[in-house]
Image (cartoon, helix red, strand yellow):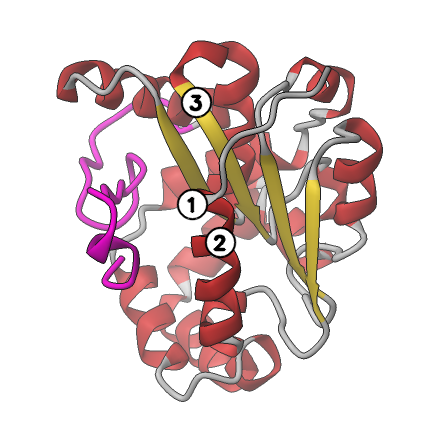
Amino acid sequence: MTSLGQAYRTYALDFWGFGESGKKRNSYTVQDFVSMVNQFMERMGIDNAPLVGHSMGGTVSLSLAIQHPTKTSKVVVVGSPIVGSSLALPLKFAGYKPIAYLLFNLMGAFRLGMRIASPSICRDPGFPEMMDSDLTKTTLESFLISIATLRRTDLRPYLDQIKIPTLGMFGDRDNIVDPRQYQVMQSGIPTARIERFKNAGHFIMLDEPEPFKQTLRNFLSAEASMPS
């Protein structure tokens, strides 16, 4: 945000049920988040803008580009599942109600387990604190429903509808989303630009911050060339 803010007006959204956004909703599906971004743009008077999304945020960004093509000028996805089956096995299980309830009823143990696993997820020394803070701001319902619907998501039949410049960034060491999702994106959107980061995992912006920022800036500043 700080880096891009030097050249762009930037906005960051917490999806409903996460971060600082409202928690009192009946539904937290991926489609709800697509609608949320669309409504945010309408309320803010943003007719058209590039979207940058990490993980589920990238899935939402691609979905918005498919459903509201005039709203998006470019899309960047970072370690995002194009097909929900690419999620790591523990995350798939977390999309089932009994397991989600167990995790949240044992939140202390869950948070401790995440701290222990953190070095295998991200090399940034500040990651354990960031993840712990995020977990304390997440509700059971938003966690359960969003993961359950993400697990069932499959954007492959719709990718050929995306005609805008698209960038996919994937870390070869990602153990949250199968990094081979870049192949799915590339085959579905032949004009997509793919950048792979050999030494990064799911959080490329933390594992390789400078190459990540440079790649993102270059893509956003490049003149759009529409496919013929």
Front disc: 2 or 3: 2
Hey, which quadrant is residue 132 in on the image?
A: bottom left
* Tags 1 and 2 touching, CB below 8 Å: yes
Q: Is residue 73 above or below residue 175?
A: above
Please report the bounds of the magenta region as a residue range: 1-28
Q: Is residue 26 left or right of residue 165?
A: left
What residue do we see at 56% from left, 35% from top?
Answer: 59
Q: Which residue is mark 2?
A: 218
Question: Where in the figure is residue 188, as x and y percent of width and height?
Answer: 79, 28
* Tags 1 and 3 touching, CB below 8 Å: no
Disc 2 or 3, which lies upstream in sequence? 3
Q: Amino acid at mark 2?
A: Asn
What residue do we see at 44% from left, 64% from top?
Answer: 213
* Quarter containing the C terminus: top right
Question: Where in the figure is residue 215, as x and y percent of width and height?
Answer: 53, 59
Q: Which residue is mark 3?
A: 72
Q: Amino acid at mark 1?
A: Ser
- Magenta includes 8? yes
Q: Is residue 17 left or right of residue 165?
A: left
Disc 1 or 3, which lies upstream in sequence? 3
* Quarter containing the N terminus: bottom left
The label on residue 76 is none
Q: Which residue is mark 1?
A: 221
